Image (tube, rainbow, N blue to C red):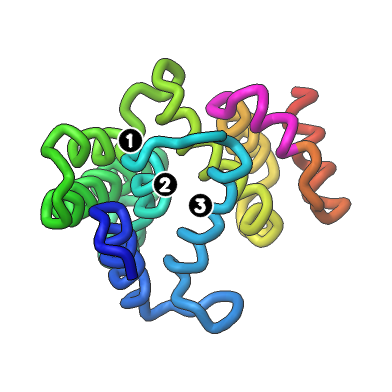
Amino acid sequence: MSDTPYDQTLAAIDALHAEDPRVEGESLPQELFYARRMSAWLETLADSPSEPLQLAVRAQHLQRWKVPREAYPEGRVGYLTWRRDQGKQAGETTARLMEAAGYSADDAARAARLIRKQGLGRDPETQALEDCACLVFLENYFGDFSRQVEHDHLIRIVQKTWKKMSPEAHALALQLPMSEEARGLVEEALAG
C-alpha cells in the first residue's frame, strides 16, 4: 500500500465502511458496496477530480448505519434532519481521517463541505457528488424503492431528484438499464 495521504485516507474510509453489519451484493458490507458504486460513477463524470472530491464521494454514507433513519420522525422534516445529521457526522469523520493522514485543514474542510452538499447548484464538485448519488440511486436502488412508496409521492421524489442533477447526469440516467415499470415511472415524472 502506498503511503500517500490519499491512500491512507481511502483505506481508513473503507475500513469504516467494512464495519457495516448490513450485507449487500457479493457479501460485501452495504456501505462499502455503495461507496465503490459512487467512486465508479465519479470516474465516468469527472476527468480529473480533486482528492477531496474523490474522498468525499467515497465517504458520503460513512457510518450511515450509526445514524438510523428510524430514530427520526416520519415525514419530510424528519428525513431532512436525519440527512443533515448524517452528512455532518460523515463530513466530520472524513475530515479527521484526512488530517490524520497529513491533509491540510483546508482540504479536510473542503471534503466535509462536499459531503454536506454545500454549494449544490453553484459548486461543480458538489454537483459531481450529487450526480454520483443520484445515478447510484437510480441504477441500483430505485426499482426496489419504487415498490415501497406511494405512486404520487414517488413521482415527486423522482422530479426532485432530477432537479438536483446536471444535464450530463440526466443523459447518463436516461441510458441506465431499468425495468419497464421503473422506466415508466421516470418518464411519467419527467412529463409532469
Whole-percent x, y for residue 20 in the image: 36, 75
Mark 3 is surrounded, within 10 Å at the Cα level, by few (under 14), some (14 to 19) or many (20 or more) other residues, namely many
Return the residue nearer the eye: 80 or 178: 178
Return the residue nearer the eye: 1 or 161: 1
Q: Which residue is mark 2?
A: 57
Alpha carbon distance from label 1 to label 3 = 14 Å
Q: Which residue is mark 3?
A: 39
| Residue 141, image quadrant | bottom right
Identify which residue is drawn at 60% across, 76% down: 25
Query: In the image, is residue 71 part of the stretch drawn in magenta?
Result: no
Q: Which residue is mark 1?
A: 114
Indicate left or right for 126 with 63 as reference: right
Q: Which residues are magenta?
A: 163-173
Indicate left or right for 6 with 146 as reference: left
Q: Is the stretch drawn in magenta largely helix, strand or loop?
A: helix
Mark 1 is surrounded, within 10 Å at the Cα level, by few (under 14), some (14 to 19) or many (20 or more) other residues, namely many
**Is residue 116 depicted above or below 119 in this figure?**
below
Mark 3, secondary structure of its residue: helix
Nearer mark to the viewer, of 1 and 3: 3
Evaluate if marks 2 and 1 touch, with contact meaning CB atoms under 8 Å apart: yes
Alpha carbon distance from label 2 to label 1 = 8 Å
Farthest residue in the right direction?
180
Label 1 vs 3, first from the N-terminus: 3
